[in-house]
Image (cartoon, grey):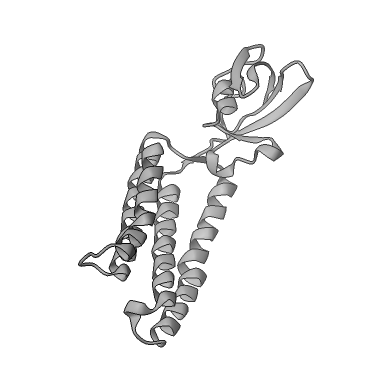
Amino acid sequence: MRLFSLLCVEAIMLPHFFKNYPHPYDLTRARAFSTLVLTLVFGIIQGLIYFFMPEYISVEGLEKLKQELHGLKTTRRQEIAVRLEHAKSLGDLSENAEYQETKEEQALLERQIIDLEDMIRNAVMIKSDRPMDVVTVGSTVVVDAGHGPETYKIVGSEEAKPIEGKISNESPLGKAFLRGRVGDSVKVKTPGGTVEYKILEIT
């Protein structure tokens, strides 16, 4: 992820480099190129993530993703198309800031659509008939770290909402609970030190 961040920064800075130093390419091409670099790098990173770390999701969560994708492919695409047509009517595209900004926004939208399509295509449904004697994705687990019972639901990263007790299977806490059984104690490293949780109940 550090490499990805550095590449993003370099891509974002490209237009400024071309703006301040003589170069055969103009600023418009530099901006287009930086957007392309960001899109390609992000796509590669996302592809690797999906390949090595499948996205677990509930039936409800999958339906929400499909609704979001539909909105992007219809309403959002149409909004950007209208803005592009308006920007084109303003004149010279090479010096048209509104046109370039909208084109960049369009590229990011298409990247988002591709990401959602990949996520939906590669999603692993959380099984309703999962075992109840071991913690898996979809389990609700009651634990105690010495301050009274706490309840967590193990979900995929897309549906994680820690404030509601829904923790990702990829989070340190979620990873520690996975494959645990009632009576097991697991240790989790936190910024404040190592915390030991005892599993009290699994549903």
Which quarter of the image is occupied by the C terminus? top right
- Taking depth in this image into account, of 13 and 84 the one nearest to the observer is 13
- Taking depth in this image into account, of 154 and 32 the one nearest to the observer is 32
Residue 67 seen in render: yes
Vertically, is 195 above or below 163?
A: above
- Taking depth in this image into account, of 138 and 13 the one nearest to the observer is 13
The residue most toward the front is 21
- The picture places residue 20, in percent across and down from the top left corner, at 33, 63
- The picture places residue 165, in percent across and down from the top left corner, at 69, 35
Vertically, is 135 above or below 26?
A: above
Task: State left or right for residue 43 relative to residue 199.
Answer: left
- The picture places residue 176, in percent across and down from the top left corner, at 56, 21
Tell me how many marks there are: 0
The residue most toward the left is 24
- The picture places residue 92, in percent across and down from the top left corner, at 34, 84
Q: Residue at x 77, y 22 (%)?
A: 149
Q: Residue at x 54, y 25 (%)?
A: 175
Which quarter of the image is occupied by the N terminus? top left
Task: State left or right for residue 58 relative to residue 103.
Answer: right
Q: Residue at x 42, y 78 (%)?
A: 84
Task: State left or right for residue 3 relative to residue 61.
Answer: left
Residue 1 seen in render: no
Query: Which quadrant would residue 185 be assigned to in this image?
Result: top right
Q: Residue at x 59, y 33 (%)?
A: 138
